Image (spheres, helix red, strand yellow):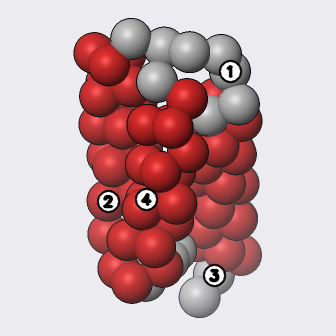
Amino acid sequence: MTAQTRRYFVRARSAVAGSLIAAASLTGVGAAPSAAASARLDGVRADLENAVSMNMVTADQAERFYAQLERRILAGA
């Protein structure tokens, strides 16, 4: 792996981690309409699918994280 490729993976992992943290922090925001919760979950799902396709997380890790966020988002919705 070249240095440039390694930098790409580090940057991509940072971007994915940042979006996952942002999604997790949104779960603490007050009550949201169910349409907004659904849209939020769709975005989380898309980010996790990208992370799995880039081999940054396993499909099992992504599913567990999604289930955790889904519970939190729907509890607040």
Q: Is residue 32 above or below residue 16?
A: above
Q: Is residue 60 above or below residue 23?
A: below
Question: Distance of mark 3 from mark 1, alpha carbons?
Answer: 41 Å
Q: Indicate which disc residue 49 carries.
A: 2
Residue 20: % across, % down: 60, 48
Residue 11: % across, % down: 68, 55
Question: Distance of mark 2 from mark 1, alpha carbons?
Answer: 24 Å
Q: Which residue in the structure is indicated by mark 1?
A: 29
Q: Earlier in the sequence, mark 4 or mark 2?
A: 2
State the residue in front, 18 or 10. 18
Q: Earlier in the sequence, mark 3 or mark 4?
A: 3
Q: Earlier in the sequence, mark 1 or mark 4?
A: 1
Q: Amino acid at mark 4?
A: Tyr
Q: Which residue in the structure is indicated by mark 3?
A: 2
- Helix, strand or loop under label 2: helix
Mark 3 or 1, closer to the camera:
1
Mark 1 or 4, closer to the camera:
1
Q: Residues within 10 Å of mark 3 (few under 14, many from 20)?
A: few
- Helix, strand or loop under label 4: helix
Q: Amino acid at mark 1?
A: Val
Q: Which residue in the structure is indicated by mark 4?
A: 66
What residue is drawn where x is 62% and y is 34%?
27
State the residue in front, 12 or 67. 67
Q: Is residue 11 visible?
A: no
- Helix, strand or loop under label 3: loop
Residue 37, picture quadrant: top left
Question: Which quarter of the rendered picture does the N terminus lie within?
Answer: bottom right
Q: Amino acid at mark 3?
A: Thr
